[in-house]
Image (cartoon, rainbow, N blue to C red):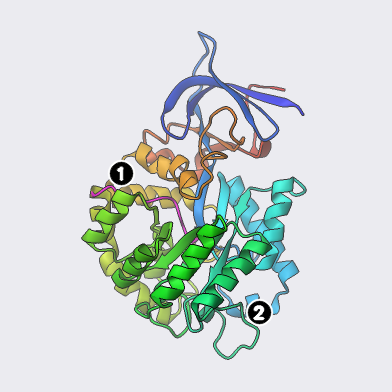
Amino acid sequence: MSTTTITGVTVWDGERERGLSDVTWEGDRILTVAPSAEGTVDTGLSLIPGLVDTHVHLDTDAVTGKADRAWGIITPPEERSLHALAHAQTAMRHGVTTLRDLASEPAYFALSRMLDSGVITGPRVLTAGPVGMTAGHGDLFTPPHYPHRPPVADSPDECRKLVRHWARAGADAIKVYTSGGILSIGDKVSWRNHTDAELAATVDEAHALGMLVAAHSHSVEGIDRALQAGVDSIEHGTAMSIAQMEILAERRIPVAPTLLIHVRLDARVEGTSDEAREKTLALSAVRDHTLTEGGRRDVRFVLGTDANGVFTTFGDQMEELRIMAARIGWDAERTLKSGTSDAADAIAMGQTVGRIRSGLGADLVLMDGRPWQDIAELDTARIRAVVSRGRLVAGELPTTRG
Ligand SMILES: [Zn+2]
């Protein structure tokens, strides 16, 4: 296996600046991060870890980028998996080298394994098996009358069985819903999803089988129930109360705020239904308050975009982080941590990615500027090269030795 060294770049390692450095990797493994020789000229280039998006959906048409419910029904799974791959590779070329899909279908488990094995070049894709109820948020992405539906679980025992089903299939995590949603058809955000007993069984079984549980929760009630069940992350968390912020901060539970998609739904990008717009506007009224107050109380917000290739695309993660900085009131370095080291820790990948450190995976983004000093410089237009699993997948590396 050949080694590659990039010399004389300023490294920001996922937590702090390391100065002008030489970074060497072999295959998908960083070997050394060492200070550059004295007298090395600073070219203004910097190296940051590949971004980690803890919340995406790979299940849309990667060609048209249109919201089309029929597409998911008429397109066979084999073909959908290749669209998912295209989305993942698009994200990778834009500096996002780890993605967690938060409602995976069986073909994605195979995709994830093929990427891990190196058979196909692509980012790390983590998967999550959805455990939702009949008439829940997850169930109602499929039109109500349609007979072929993803599995649902309607009792504590059925929840355990579905968790086990996903574990056997190879899922990394479990997704649950404790409130209704925006893009689902015919439900209300305020609808209770699952009983407390069903949630408790799901979380217990997932933890017993080594999987984290991510909870889709918009409402105060939904967040309370997710916290009570002991989930590992809150997705959206739109209407959290001050008391909940304090609990979330104290327990260091990650929250993926999924901002950009809501900014776009509010602005009514093409394809937004009247129903989705009505729901998102009601939530927007409380979102800004949640972010500023949550930021003040040190809630652990992490990068999670809800990117699905339609309302938010697979190159928008840097924009999401810029919006997080502005709305939460964070400085650039805190923001960048939430998209690298802290995002990796949040999905139990901190021993593999999220930092530029010897022994970790070689996911690297070479950029013009210093995005940890000025978040405006965290912009895909400034990407000079992307290395994913040790392979150069976009741009060019200057001054390399091989
Ligand atoms: Zn989502």
Q: Quadrant of the N terminus?
A: top right
Vertical side of 278 occupied by 364: above or below: above
The percent coordinates of residue 7 (x first, y second) are 59, 20
Circle nearer the N terminus (1, 2): 2
Query: Which residues are the magenta region?
Result: 297-306
Residue 344 lies left or right of residue 118; in this view the side is: left
Question: Is the magenta region chiefly helix, strand or loop?
Answer: loop
Closest to the observer: 306 or 30? 30
The secondary element bearing badge 1 is classed as loop
Vertical side of 129 occupied by 249: above or below: above
Q: Which residue is located at x 62 percent, y 58 percent?
A: 87
Q: What residue type is disc 2 on?
A: Ile
Q: Mark yes or no: residue 66 visible.
A: no
In the image, residue 301 lies in the stretch drawn in magenta: yes
The secondary element bearing badge 2 is classed as helix
Read off the residue under disc 2: 73
Closest to the observer: 279 or 210? 210
- In space, the residues marked 1 and 2 are separated at their CA atoms by 42 Å
Q: Tell which residue pokes out farthest to the bottom in this image.
A: 145
In the image, residue 68 lies in the stretch drawn in magenta: no
Q: Does any atom of ligand 1 lie closer than 8 Å to the CB of label 1? A: no
Q: Mark yes or no: residue 21 visible.
A: yes
Read off the residue under disc 1: 330
Closest to the observer: 121 or 397? 121
- Image quadrant where residue 242 sits: bottom left
Q: What residue type is disc 1 on?
A: Trp
